[in-house]
Image (spheres, rainbow, N blue to C red):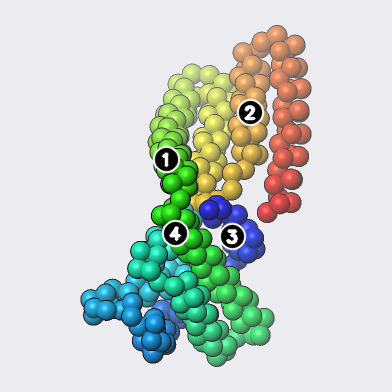
Amino acid sequence: MRSFREIKHDYRFTDEDEKRLAALRPLMEEHAGEIMSTLNLWFIGTKNASAFFNPETLKAHVFKTQKMWFSELFSGEYGNRFHEKLIKIGSAHLRRNVDVHYLQRAANLIKNACTGILSKQEETVADVTSNVISVGKIIDISMSVILSSYIEEEIRLYSPVYKVKSLLVSFSERFSQATNFVLVFALIGLTAGVVWLFVLDVVRAFSGNIEQGIISSLGSLLLLWLMIELMSTEISQLKGGKMHISVFVGVALVTMIREMMIATLQHENPESIYYLIAAILVMGSVYWIVAKTEDRHR
């Protein structure tokens, strides 16, 4: 299955879409009962589809999960957790032998119902159009993941080779997630250490050489800013965001700036300071090029 990031990119699903959907949540939750009622009436009224809703306990469970899924569409959070829930939905439908046709028809009914509700709102044509497009995107994205999961699960049942491949991929994904968690905890520890270093520099500034203490404190602040950026990048990736190489180039740049500040205070050999200045200029140029390239691709 393709990554959720790629799927969202193909649908041109942007931050604006996320904000728009989150803003629509109160309205859609107000009409959720109406929309789900329309969907369930269609299921019950369709002979082959209604066969999936016996006994009554199963029917109640399905209707409840449908409403939960619909609410999740307007959560404003569309990261790994949202993706995993969609995958589970696809696998569950395969276990119940639900025909793909009914999933697609259900999505179409929900999209039409949402469009009808949005078109009645007292907003400009442009706003209504934007809202309809965003709702259409998230429903299509959801169905894309659900159907892909459905198909992959079906292949897994009948293909021994695919089972082995699936196990390897699953193990790799879990190992990667575990590594990411270790990295997050390591960053938390390092950030706490930098905060302590900053406190020590501030204390040193008031108890001794003020000039040296202030410069050291500024260097520690740069490191603290750096750790915050690394934490934000890692959290963004865990949510399904894109990794920014510019952050890591910034690590090298900030480190060199701090080294130059310390070398200047210690009155080291001018040649070593010149080397640091040249390195800062080179890294600054690289950072500017990488940052510009990333902005162009956002």
- Relative height, residue 59 to residue 194 (above, below): below
Q: Secondary structure at mark 4?
A: helix
Which of the pair 202/56 is nearer the observer?
56
Secondary structure at badge 3 equals helix
- Would you identify the image quadrant in which residue 53 lies? bottom left
Name the disc covering residue 171, or none.
1
Q: CA distance from mark 3 to mark 2?
A: 32 Å
- Above or below: residue 176 compared with residue 107: above
Residue wearing tag 2: 252
* Sequence-earlier tag: 1 or 4: 4
Please state which amino acid type lies under the numbered disc 4.
Answer: Glu
Q: In the current view of this chain or complex, which residue is farthest to the top?
A: 269
Which of pointers 3 and 2 indicates the residue nearer the eye?
3
Q: Quick one: quadrant of the C terminus?
A: bottom right
Q: CA distance from mark 4 to mark 2?
A: 48 Å
Q: Which mark is residue 154?
A: 4
